[in-house]
Amino acid sequence: MDAADRPSEFREYSTVRVSRLIEADRFFSGGADEISREPRVGDEGVVVDRSTYEGRPVYIIECVTDGGDTLWVAEFTHDELDLVREVGEADGE
């Protein structure tokens, strides 16, 4: 999905993919010690909150393991994310 196809905002509970890391040294909150790591390009997560910083939307994204454990929670700008699945869309649609 290129920038022209990207929605103007992401809704809470939508699934997104980290497409780029504009701010390399971002603050993130890790999960359990044995699974904590920094966000990486390609990671998928869910929008758990939306806010505004200096007039621009920012998104709090939670990334979890297949087992449901939190891997990380971090803040991203719109330009760092791509939509994977909108709220309510089933897998494979």
Image: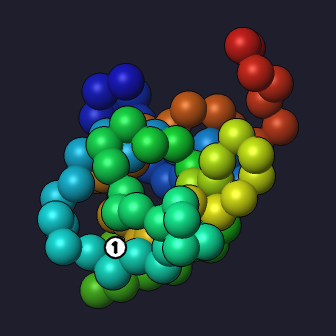
Point 22% across, 54% down: residue: 21
Q: In which quadrant is the C terminus drawn?
A: top right
Q: Nearer the viewer, residue 2 or 45?
A: 45
Q: Quarter of the image containing the N terminus?
A: top left
- Please tell me whether mark 1 sits on a helix, a strand or a loop: strand
Q: Where is residue 3 in the image (x, y as percent from the top left)?
A: 28, 35
Count of numbered tags: 1
Q: Please indicate whether residue 90 sits to the left or right of residue 71 in the image.
A: right
Residue 38 lies left or right of residue 14; in this view the side is left
| Image position, residue 44 (x, y; %) | 52, 42
Give the colour scheme shown: rainbow
Image quarter of residue 37? bottom left
Furthest-front residue in view?
34
> Can you name the residue that lies furthest to the bottom here?
54
Q: Which of 49 and 27 is in front in this view?
A: 27
Residue denoted by label 1? 56
Residue 61 in view, yes or no: no
Expressed as whole percent of the image width and height from the top left, the position of residue 9 reads 50, 54
Residue 91: tell me if it is visible: yes
Using the image, determine if residue 27 lies above or below residue 77: below
Q: Is residue 23 above or below residue 27?
A: above
Q: Residue 57 appears in which quarter of the rendering?
A: bottom left
Q: Determine the residue positioned at 48% across, 66% down.
A: 36
Name the spot of residue 29 as percent of width and height, x first: 48, 78
Q: What residue type is labelled 1?
A: Arg
